[in-house]
Amino acid sequence: MISVNEIALDIFEEMAEYPEDYNVEFHQFDNGARFIDCGVKTRGGYLAGKRFTEICMGGLGEVSFRNGQINGIPMPFIDVNTDFPAISCLGSQKAGWTVKTGNFFAMGSGPARALSLMPKHTFEVIEYEDESDVAVICLESDTLPNAEVMEHIADKCNVDVGNVCALVAPTASIVGSIQVAGRCVETSIYKLNELGFDTKKIHSAIGTAPIPPVKKDSTQAMGCTNDATIYHGQIYLTMNAPEITEYLDKIPSNKSSSYGEPFYDTFKAANFDFYQIDTALFSPAEVIINELSEGKVYRVGAVNPEVTLKSFGLL
């Protein structure tokens, strides 16, 4: 059986051994738990962002960068692909675990979720869980974890605390911008799962999104990083599921009643209350689907360069 934690551990070990190569810092607590600071007190960078994203996907995705353009304006893009979409995206990368203990708060994603089964329903649907004795977690947070946080993660994953490995990066950092944009494929898989589609029928997935500039604070960064996928994420899915035609019209972000302005502006207008925002907004801009059983290709949605550039502060 594929173990997302064991695969991701190999990537973590390399970063831990050569932190200077990634502009990160490695730390180990007295209880044996280890973590790598990828942007809280360090500057991180593209290579650290690449590895962070790969670990988020349980080592089952490939990540690369390229120089692209949005309406003629140069912009870095992230390209992500996986041949294990349900496991890598929903079973690992999905930010489905709110890690909160004491004064520490983080959105947790990565392989450790396949041990903690957070949330359990997701793993029931994709029929996957890991059996590793090592837990590797990615924490999106402005602060570094302490030993108590690592104990909490160990308890939820049912592993020894000395076998907990974490990567930490704020949303407002280079690694933060990269790893959120790197969720472009995951956003499409997540949306289909929410619509009730069996994501195990998706064979392969590839996607791209612009890497947004780093903003001043986490709230502005959250808006900017979400917009990278909402308004400019482009995804290509290969699947064996003729019933996908029933879901096509509900996939892209432009079907949401909250679509049309940068996410930060929408969030601010909603008094920073997520419950006032239509959840259908959290989808890629454009999705192309190659359905194998009938040999058909479908395209829904479209990129919105104007809103993307406005969000990025370039318009």
Image: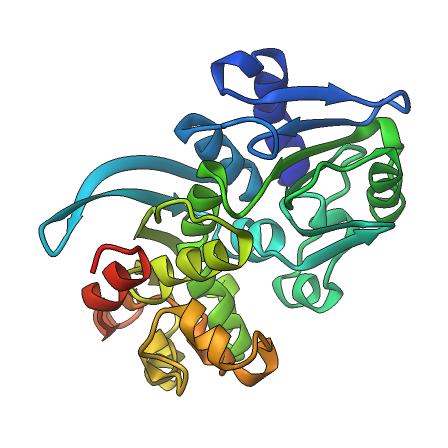
Measuring 48% from the left and 14% from the top, which residue is drawn there?
Answer: 21
Query: How far across and how far down the image is residue 35, in percent?
Result: 71, 28
Viewport quadrant of the C terminus:
bottom left
Report the side of 67 relative to 109 (left or right). Answer: left
Measuring 77% from the left and 42% from the top, which residue is drawn there?
Answer: 131
Examine the rendering and report whether any part of residue 245 can be seen.
Answer: no
Foreground residue among 286 and 309: 309
Foreground residue among 127 and 259: 259
Count every numbered label the image shows and give the total: 0
* Residue 31 higher or lower than 132, as above or below: above
Foreground residue among 100 and 13: 100
Measuring 18% from the left and 44% from the top, which residue is drawn there?
Answer: 68
Query: How far across and how far down the image is residue 199, in percent?
Result: 50, 66
Q: How is the image coloured?
A: rainbow
* Residue 22 higher or lower than 192, as above or below: above
Query: How far across and how far down the image is residue 26, in percent?
Result: 67, 20
